Image (spheres, helix red, strand yellow):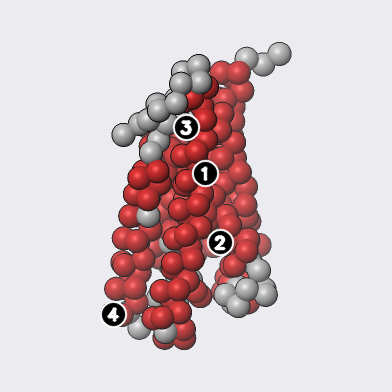
Amino acid sequence: MVAPRVTGRILRMSTAVVVAAGLVLSVVAARDEPVELLFYFTVQVNLAYLVVLLTGGGDRVRTALTVYLVGTALVFVLVLANPWSGYAMVAVADARGPVSDAGNLLLHVVTPPLAAALWLRHRPRVALRPAYAVSLLGYPLLWLTVILARGTVSRAEDRYLYPFLDVPRLGYPTVARNALLFAVTLLLIALAAVHLTRRRAIGLSGGVDGAHGE
């Protein structure tokens, strides 16, 4: 029987291979614009997650990246890859192709459940506070600010990266509504993670309530 520690190591390294392969395929699919990839939320999160997988990271960093990965998976499946959502990127010819599709599949569909499984296997031993869940919205907000600012000074057609952030087509009120919906989604995922850490902390303390992290 494989020891739990060995199983965890295999899961971590397998996840690292999947993330690395997805990023490489995305770079190949980008052809002449690989730098453009660095503006995508999914790519930034996966790059950071790969570093954490290879070098290690604290509970709060691991939790944050896992929350972001699960959030990107939901957005991809329910919005970007859904032809009935009104924001499907599959309708754009440049977004299609076997290499691009394979990269998207690995980064958006395969990596998030692997990351969630890895996090559940190594949940923080100290409960995180709900305030921590709220703080996780800071990075997406900063990213959104950069993307919107970039969109105002660029003349490229795809400068807003995602169809649901296309200000010229949708207008700021609709973009703000979309951003709020995604923020709420991330917050709910983060609160679920916080709840799971609380349950584990209570279990490790023998049922004593009130074990909290900063």
Nearer to us of marks 1 and 2 is 1
For numbered disc 4, what is the local secondary structure? helix
Helix, strand, or loop for circle 1?
helix
Dot 3 corresponds to which residue?
198
At horizontal 45% and vertical 79% (from top left) the residue drawn is 174
At 57% from the left edge and 45% from the top edge, which residue is drawn?
111
Q: Which residue is at the front of the view, 54 or 192?
A: 192
Q: Which residue is mark 1?
A: 192
What is the spatial separation of the Cα atoms under label 1 and label 4, in whole angstroms? 38 Å
Q: Secondary structure at mark 3?
A: helix
Q: Earlier in the sequence, mark 2 or mark 3?
A: 2
Which circle, 1 or 4, is nearer the viewer? 1
Residue under pointer 4: 153
Labels 2 and 3 touching (C-beta < 8 A): no
Mark sitting on residue 75? 2
Q: Residues within 10 Å of mark 3 (few under 14, many from 20)?
A: many
Which one is earlier in the sequence, the residue at label 1 or at label 2? 2
Query: Where residue 212 sits: x, y (%)?
Result: 37, 30
Mark 3–mark 1 distance (CA, rounded to whole Å): 10 Å
